[in-house]
Image (spheres, grey):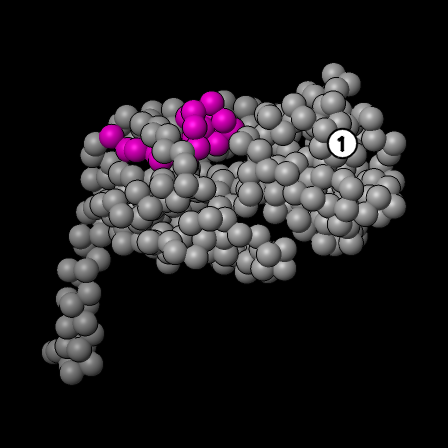
C-alpha cells in the first residue's frame, strides 16, 4: 500500500534524480579531451613550473593531455577573464593565486568578478617570503633594520616585482605593522629587483625560497621569514614575528579554479585528483625544497580562505592607497 507520505517521498526523489544524474554522468565522462591549465604569467617562472609539474602528473592520471597555456599581462586579469568566460565543463582550469584575492581592490573597472565568477577547486601550495637586504646596509637582524629605517625616515626603498604583486603587498604590510616610512620602487619582475638590491641601489626586497641562493652565495643578506614559524629550508632564519614585528605573517599561495557553473561532481573529482597528485613523491619532492607546502583542502575550504584573503588584503590596499592603472 502506498501512503500519501510515501508517495510524496517518491515524487520528490523522482524530481531530484534528473538533476543529479546528469551531474554524475558529466563527472564519469570527464575529462574526454585535452585539459588546459591557464597560467597568468610567462613561461619559466615559479607559477609556470608548478603548473607543468602538476599537469604532467594529472595527464597520466586522467589519460588525457594537460596543456599549459601562458597568458601573462594585465596583472593576471587577461588569464583570469579568459577562464571566467570559458565553457564550464572542467576542461579549462585557472592556475590562480593571491591575485584572486587582491584584484578587486587594485582595479576599479574589472569586466569579471575574481571571486563570484569562479568555483574553487583545490589548494595547490602555499609559501612565505624571505626578507632580503644588501650587504652594504649596517644591519644584521629584522629589529636592527626597523631601527635603522626609523632613524632614516623616508630615505630607504622597498623594491618589488611590480605594483600590487604579492611581495609588494607583503612589504606594505611590513611597513604598516613596523611603523616605517619607505618609498616603493616597482620593477618588472623579481630578477631585476634583485639585481638592484645586490649593489644597494634599493634597500629591501621580499622574495621566495628560490632567491635564497643569492644569500647563500654572499651576494645579499637574508634577515627574516614571513611565515608564522621558521622555514624548513632555512631554519636559521628567524620569523619576522619573533624578531621585531609580533603577529606578522604573510603566506602567498596557488590554487586551481574553474568557471563558476562547472558541475560540482567534476569539481569534486578534480579536487580529489589534485590532492592525490600533490601527494605523489615525484611532485612533493620537487616542491618541498623550494619551501612550497601543500595541504588537502576541500573546495569549500578554499573558497572560505579566498574570501578571508580578499578581506585582509583589501584593507592593506586601502590603507596603503595602492592604485593600479586600469
For the residue pair 314 and 304, the one nearer the viewer reads as 314
Relative placement, left or right, of 268 versus 224 is left
What is the crowding at mark 1: few (fewer than 14 residues within 10 Å), some, or many (at least 20)?
A: many
At x 34%, y 25%, the residue is 60
Q: How many numbered circles are shown?
A: 1
Relative placement, left or right, of 12 versus 205 is left
Q: Note whether 314 is above or below 174 in the view shown.
A: below
For the residue pair 36 and 185, the one nearer the viewer reads as 185
> At which x and y percent is residue 240?
77, 43
> At which x and y percent is residue 115?
41, 55
> At which x and y percent is residue 189?
55, 30
Is any part of residue 111 visible from this angle? yes
Q: What element carries label 1?
A: strand
| The furthest residue to the left | 1
The residue identified by callout 1 is 133
Q: Note whether 233 is above or below 325 in the view shown.
A: above
Q: Note whether 235 is above or below 100 in the view shown.
A: above
The boundaries of the magenta stretch are 34-53
At x 84%, y 48%, the residue is 150
**Quadrant location, the N terminus:** bottom left
Quadrant for residue 96, please give it.
top left
Q: Note whether 147 is above or below 72 in the view shown.
A: below
| The furthest residue to the top | 217
**Would residue 87 be counted in the magenta stretch?**
no
> At which x and y percent is residue 102?
50, 51
At x 51%, y 28%, the residue is 46
At x 49%, y 26%, the residue is 45
Relative placement, left or right, of 60 versus 230 is left
Is any part of residue 126 visible from this angle? no
Amino acid at each position: 500500500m502506498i501512503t500519501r507520505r510515501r508517495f510524496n517521498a517518491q515524487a520528490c526523489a523522482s524530481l531530484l534524480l534528473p538533476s543529479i544524474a546528469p551531474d554524475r554522468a558529466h563527472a564519469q565522462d570527464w575529462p574526454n579531451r585535452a585539459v588546459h591549465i591557464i597560467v597568468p604569467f610567462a613561461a619559466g617562472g615559479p607559477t609556470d613550473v608548478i603548473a607543468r609539474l602538476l599537469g604532467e602528473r594529472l595527464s597520466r592520471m586522467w589519460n588525457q593531455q594537460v596543456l599549459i597555456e601562458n597568458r601573462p599581462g594585465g596583472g593576471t586579469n587577461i588569464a583570469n577573464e579568459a577562464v571566467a568566460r570559458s565553457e564550464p565543463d572542467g576542461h579549462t582550469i585557472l592556475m590562480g593565486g593571491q591575485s584572486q584575492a587582491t584584484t578587486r581592490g587594485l582595479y576599479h573597472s574589472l569586466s569579471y568578478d575574481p571571486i563570484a565568477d569562479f568555483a574553487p577547486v583545490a589548494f595547490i601550495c602555499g609559501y612565505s617570503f624571505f626578507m632580503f637586504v644588501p650587504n652594504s646596509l649596517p644591519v644584521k637582524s629584522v629589529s636592527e633594520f626597523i631601527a635603522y629605517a626609523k632613524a632614516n625616515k623616508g630615505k630607504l626603498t622597498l623594491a618589488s616585482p611590480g605594483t600590487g604583486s604579492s611581495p609588494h603587498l607583503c612589504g606594505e604590510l611590513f611597513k604598516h605593522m613596523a611603523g616605517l616610512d619607505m618609498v616603493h620602487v616597482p620593477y618588472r619582475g623579481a630578477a631585476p629587483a634583485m639585481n638592484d638590491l645586490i649593489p644597494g641601489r634599493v634597500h629591501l626586497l621580499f622574495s621566495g625560497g628560490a632567491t635564497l641562493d643569492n644569500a647563500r652565495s654572499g651576494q645579499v643578506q637574508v634577515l627574516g621569514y614571513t611565515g608564522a614559524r621558521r622555514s624548513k629550508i632555512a631554519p636559521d632564519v628567524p620569523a619576522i614575528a619573533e624578531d621585531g614585528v609580533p603577529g606578522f605573517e604573510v603566506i602567498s599561495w596557488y590554487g586551481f579554479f574553474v568557471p563558476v557553473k562547472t558541475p560540482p561532481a567534476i569539481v569534486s573529482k578534480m579536487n580529489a585528483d589534485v590532492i592525490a597528485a600533490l601527494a605523489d613523491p615525484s611532485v612533493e619532492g620537487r616542491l618541498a625544497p623550494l619551501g612550497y607546502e601543500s595541504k588537502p583542502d576541500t573546495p569549500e575550504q578554499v573558497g572560505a580562505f579566498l574570501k578571508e584573503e580578499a578581506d585582509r588584503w583589501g584593507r592593506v590596499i586601502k590603507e596603503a592607497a595602492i592604485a593600479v592603472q586600469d
